[in-house]
Image (cartoon, rainbow, N blue to C red):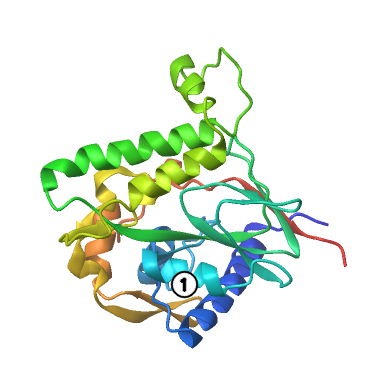
């Protein structure tokens, strides 16, 4: 049960993505690699050298189909979405696919998360049609995410990291209740026509909100010697996330998620 080094972890994540890509193509499910994974594909033709996670995004309806069809148990790779079982605990605003032959700890997380090595799946939801509402919408998403995560931590009245009132508010509801509040809020505009949408559950503010055209066409991009799907206008997406994305960040900003992972014994 030796801990994986960074490259070994990246290759384990790649195995999951290969399986997800195959499943999505077979079932005609739309997805795109996203965030640092998409940046890695464009800038490095693979993982950002110091990156230790892997992200994709799907239109909400496609993610729902994926979660309905993809195995939830009894297979090496299974999906997680508001999941609490004996073996897994994962209550987030987005989904995951994990490798059940492994164990994974994200040291920077301060609430309960019990998974194998995994990739993230962010749903793409509509944003308000009025741009003046985008800031408040994104801010509320971040606040609800924070309450859901606080509800999964032990309640300590005094803490340097978290003010008392948000902690009291968070612990008045269960994590499952907060999950459904978040999901209802995120999906409230999906039934209306809006020129804006994005992976808003990422919680990074208005830079998660894009013109709809960014998500209307898809193409293949190279990543670690394989072809995976990406939004065709990946330039607009990456500029929205990173600005001058071809410029390498300074060394002090090349941070990881501090993941410890290993494969279980046979």
- Where is residue 181? Give x, y as percent: 42, 41
The vertical placement of 106 against 46, above or below, is above
Q: Residue at x 28, y 69 (%)?
A: 234
x then y, percent, for residue 139: 29, 37
Q: Among all residues in the image, which is located at the extreme top?
A: 158
Q: In the rendered image, which quarter contains the N terminus?
A: bottom right
Please name whichever residue, 6 or 38, is drawn nearer the observer in this view of the structure.
Answer: 38
Q: Is residue 244 visible?
A: no
Residue 46 visible in the shown view: yes
User: Dot 1 surroundings within 10 Å: few (below 14), some, or many (20 or more)?
Assistant: some
Note whether 150 is above or below 164 in the view shown: below
Q: Position of residue 230 (x, y in %)?
A: 35, 74
Q: Is residue 111 above or below residue 77?
A: above
Question: SS class of the residue under badge 1?
Answer: helix
Q: Quadrant of the C terminus?
A: bottom right
The residue singled out by tag 1 in the image is 65
Closest to the observer, 50 or 92 = 92
Residue positioned most to the right = 266
Q: Residue at x 51, y 47 (%)?
A: 92
Q: Nearer the viewer, residue 5 or 217?
A: 217
Side of 206 relative to 266 (left or right)? left
Q: Quadrant of residue 185?
A: top left
At 25% from the left and 78% from the top, the residue drawn is 217
129 with respect to 176 (left or right): left
Does residue 67 lie above or below 106 as drawn?
below
**Residue 7 image point, x, y percent:** 62, 63
Q: In this view of the protein, which residue sits in the foreground, 33 or 209?
A: 209
């Amino acid at each position: 049960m030796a801990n994986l080094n960074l490259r070994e972890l990246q290759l384990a994540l790649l195995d999951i993505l290969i399986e997800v890509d195959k499943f999505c193509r077979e079932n005609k499910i739309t997805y795109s690699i996203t965030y640092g994974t998409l940046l890695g594909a464009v800038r490095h033709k693979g993982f950002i050298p110091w990156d230790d996670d892997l992200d994709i995004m799907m239109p909400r309806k496609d993610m729902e189909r994926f979660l309905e069809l993809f195995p939830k148990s009894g297979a090496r790779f299974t999906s997680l979405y508001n999941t609490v079982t004996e073996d897994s605990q994962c209550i987030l605003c987005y989904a995951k696919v994990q490798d059940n032959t492994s164990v994974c700890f994200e040291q920077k997380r301060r609430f309960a998360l019990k998974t194998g090595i995994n990739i993230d799946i962010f749903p793409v939801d509509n944003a308000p049609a009025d741009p003046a509402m985008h800031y408040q919408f994104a801010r509320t998403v971040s606040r609800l995410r924070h309450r859901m995560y606080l509800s999964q931590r032990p309640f300590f009245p005094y803490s340097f990291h978290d003010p008392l009132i948000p902690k009291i508010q968070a612990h008045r509801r269960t994590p499952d209740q907060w999950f459904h509040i978040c999901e209802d809020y995120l999906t409230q505009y999906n039934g209306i026509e809006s020129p804006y949408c994005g992976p808003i559950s990422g919680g990074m503010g208005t830079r998660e909100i894009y013109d709809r055209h960014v998500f209307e066409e898809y193409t293949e991009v190279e990543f670690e010697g394989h072809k995976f799907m990406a939004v065709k206008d990946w330039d607009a997406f990456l500029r929205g996330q990173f600005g001058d994305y071809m410029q390498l960040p300074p060394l002090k900003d090349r941070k990881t998620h501090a993941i410890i992972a290993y494969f279980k014994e046979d």
